[in-house]
Amino acid sequence: MRVDKFLWCVRYFKTRSIATNACKQGKVRLEDEILKPSKEVFPGDKLRVRKNQINYEIEVLDLPKSRVGAKLVNLYIHDVTPKEAFEKLDLLKYSKDYYRKKGTGRPTKKDRRDIDDWFENAGDKIEEKEVEPKKDE
């Protein structure tokens, strides 16, 4: 079975064309050899697939006839990806800044609402502080 079709059948990729593109980009390897999408896969092969910044390591147990359901995937592959790969992904998520730095670019919709609220509240306080004009003595 072709490697792109196999990865699609065992649900590593959503579509076969995405699996083909991953092979063409060098993200699928067989024992440090970059595979073309048309390369045949056999039971016992150990594939390394780079997806979402994780190097998945899978062992081919059997070849499916067609795309299989999620519950049946374990009959065809054995995932031997080390836990450290998933821990690195968690650390990467925490290290990213999810919010832009203050003072850079246009305000977001949330920033604009916060600014409007601040001006409304500041205007109320100014009106409260206004004092009646002094009478001439």
Image (tube, rainbow, N blue to C red):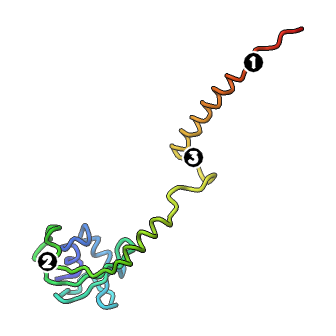
Q: Which residue is mark 1?
A: 131
Q: Secondary structure at mark 2?
A: helix
**Quarter where residue 66 is shown:** bottom left
The percent position of residue 39, horizontal first and vertical second, equals: 23, 86
Q: Secondary structure at mark 1?
A: loop
The percent position of residue 121, horizontal first and vertical second, equals: 61, 31
Dot 2 amino acid type: Leu
Q: Which residue is mark 3?
A: 107
What residue do we see at 47% from left, 65% from top?
94
The mark that comes first in sequence, 3 or 1, is: 3
Residue 15 vs residue 87, the one in the foreground? 87
Tell me the mark number nearer the camera, choosing from 3 and 1: 1
Dot 3 amino acid type: Pro
**Distance (Cα) linking label 3 and label 1:** 35 Å
The mark that comes first in sequence, 2 or 3, is: 2
**Quarter where residue 21 is shown:** bottom left
Tell me the mark number nearer the camera, choosing from 2 and 3: 2
